[in-house]
Image (spheres, grey):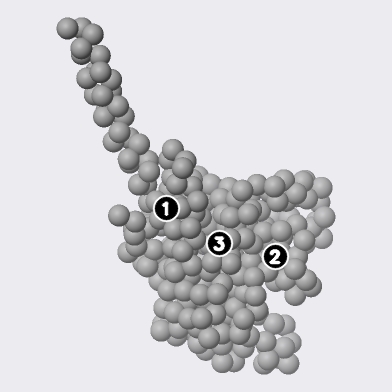
Amino acid sequence: MTLSLRPLLALVACLWLLPARVEAAERPARIVIDPGHGGAKEGAKGPGALREKEVALQIAHRLRTKLEAAGGEVHLTRERDTLMSLTERVSMTNDHGADLFISIHANSMPTPKMRARTEGVETYFLSANASGEAALAVADRENAEAPVARAARGDSTLALILEDLVRTEAHADSSRLAYSIHPKLVARTKAADRGVQQAPFFVLSGVECPAVLVEVGYISHPEEGAKLARGDYQEKLAEAISEGVLAFLRESRRRDASRPAQVASPGAR
């Protein structure tokens, strides 16, 4: 009698473990959206009173709504117009155990001539070496709020961190995420395609998950800046980023299907 019960007990034990495994497998993707700047740090300036910090926050809220509707667990690094350091943004992201990090920004040019002619979208992932001088200039501007001065780009500690990051799966996935989002941005908005770029952004350097920084357009351009202030255009941007994120998660889920516990993409049933 005792021997005949052993298979049944083994089955009960397996069934006892099953709910925990199913729950782990179906956990929604945990996504942190980072609206750039905030508070006294206004970011780039656009037509009239338009500021980068406002545009980034508005798009971030729209993006959160779309990703939550798809089943994601979404957190914003700032919910309103508040000052938050880059270090705090990184720490918050890691504390949440994020699966993805998306930083939203708007670009700018310094001179009237360049402001009048430069427009388009760019999507960045972290690299110790920038794609070019223009990409490095964008990183320098966004890193102005970092606790490390611009002149310290070659600091040995930061260089070691970046070199180590290059070898991680998160870095490879950051590239994949950028290439998943960017074409959808161009297709949805019909904006000028300034490509997927690499640069040493401080806010991306400490995040322990795939991370990208999206420059949604040039707020300094007279026409594109005006578009960035419009709700319908912000919806297009949010929809494009959401589509790119969901496509990335679906691809990652298929790739990781053999692993014992995966992150389910939003919208998965």
Q: Earlier in the sequence, mark 3 or mark 2?
A: 3
Give the mark count: 3
Q: Which residue is drawn at 82% across and 55% down?
A: 154
Q: Which of 201 and 244 is in front in this view?
A: 244
Q: Mark 1 points at which residue?
A: 29
The reply to whether discs 3 and 1 touch (Cβ–Cβ < 8 Å) is: no
Residue at 41%, 78% (x, y): give it. 235
Q: Three-letter amino acid code at disc 1?
A: Ala
Q: Could you classify mark 2 by the number of other residues whose Cα lies within 10 Å: few (under 14), some (14-19), or many (20 or more)?
A: many
Rounded to the nearest angstrom, the CA distance separating label 3 from label 2 is 13 Å
Residue extending farthest left: 1
- Quadrant containing the N terminus is top left
Q: Which amino acid does label 3 sit on?
A: Leu
Q: Earlier in the sequence, mark 3 or mark 1?
A: 1
Answer few, some or many: residues within 10 Å of disc 1's Cα (few below 14, many 20 plus, some between 14 and 19). Answer: many
Q: In this view, does 268 lie above or below 54?
A: above
Which residue corresponds to mark 2? Answer: 198
Q: Residues under labels 1 and 2: Cα distance?
A: 25 Å
